[in-house]
Image (cartoon, helix red, strand yellow):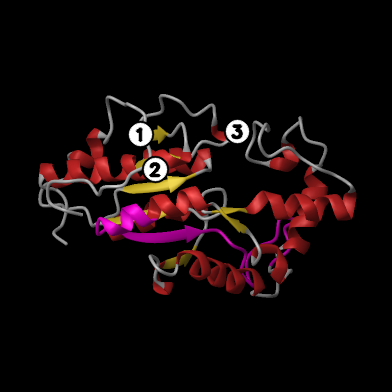
Amino acid sequence: MSDNKKSAGLIAAAPTANDWPNASILNPPPHFQWSRILMTDLHGVIADWEANFQKFAEVHFGKSFNATTRKFYDIGRDPSQSITPDQFNELFIEFVRLPEGYGALAPNPVIIRQFEEIAKAGIKIVVATYTPGATDTRPDGAMGFHHGIAQRVTKELILKHMGHIVREQDIIFCRPSEKKYLMFDMHCPILVEDHPVTAVDVATSAHSAILVPRSYNASIINVQNVLRLENDNQLADAVLTAFEALLDRGVLAKA
């Protein structure tokens, strides 16, 4: 990022918000500086998790769900969808065991273009995502998926589509509730998310969250420290506007 200009070539301006960037990241504790790091979720942001899962659900149960109109992040508990919680859990356990499940997710080209603009500005991108590992507790309460296929193919997926701007060591597998602690340790001011609960969780710790617009996070409006975009192509402008303001305030570490 230049010291006084945003990177050129942005596609769309971010929504106007009087409190963006948020006061809490503009005014950190004395002698504190933010790092030039942006953290982002993977599923629902960079990659379309639901399309492959929906195909899997249709084959096994003849059940489908509408990813563009549902109102809740939890598909199995959304009353407008035909899949039940038990069916969802059963399918999820099987889905994460398939290399062609997590490993074949479709990328979001609009979002990737936005991250390319952000990376050009000298901001490191860290991908922090929940992807089940061999010892993670399954949705049915049993301990362990007993394999690491999902994490292996997820890392390969990220590097395939974003390896030109994301390093392997900057891919982190974690629980959603851990992201705010990782951000604190990294001095990372902003998280890009689709999950409304995670965005609000980060915001309550005085960090900032940017929500990409999805049907299941439409209710998150006017929430302190959460900026919900109107379109995916507004991401780079929102991020670079915030980092420029941090730079101008003198709370952003030098490149």
Q: Which residue is mark 2?
A: 235
Residue 215 tag number: 3
**Pick the front one: 148 or 122:** 122
Residue density around tag 3, few if under 14, some if 14–19, many if 20 or more, within 10 Å: some
Do the residues bearing badges 3 and 1 touch, measured as CB atoms within 8 Å? no
Q: Is residue 31 above or below residue 97?
A: above
Type of the residue with mark 2: Leu
Secondary structure under tag 2 reads helix
Q: Which residues are magenta?
A: 116-143
Q: x and y percent of residue 164 in the render?
A: 40, 68
Badge 1 element: loop
Q: CA distance from mark 2 to mark 1?
A: 7 Å
Task: Tell me the quarter of the image containing the N terminus.
Answer: bottom left
CA distance for labels 2 and 3 = 17 Å
Residue 160: % across, % down: 52, 70
Distance from label 3 to label 1 (Cα)?
Answer: 19 Å
Q: Verify whether residue 204 appears in magenta.
A: no
Please tell me which residue lies in front, 112 or 22.
112
Residue drawn at 82 percent across, 49 percent down? 87
Mark 3 or 1 closer to N-term? 1
Q: Is residue 4 left or right of residue 83?
A: left
Marks 2 & 1, CB-CB < 8 Å contact: yes
User: Which residue is label 1 attached to?
Assistant: 14
Q: Are marks 2 and 3 in contact (CB under 8 Å)?
A: no
Which of the two residues, 95 or 160, is positioned nearer the viewer here? 160
Q: Which circle, 3 or 1, is nearer the viewer?
A: 1
Judge the density around disc 2: few (<14), some (14-19), many (≥20) Cα neighbours within 10 Å: many
The residue at the point 61 percent across, 71 percent down is: 153
Residue at 16 percent across and 52 percent down: it is 252
Residue 206 visible, this orientation? no
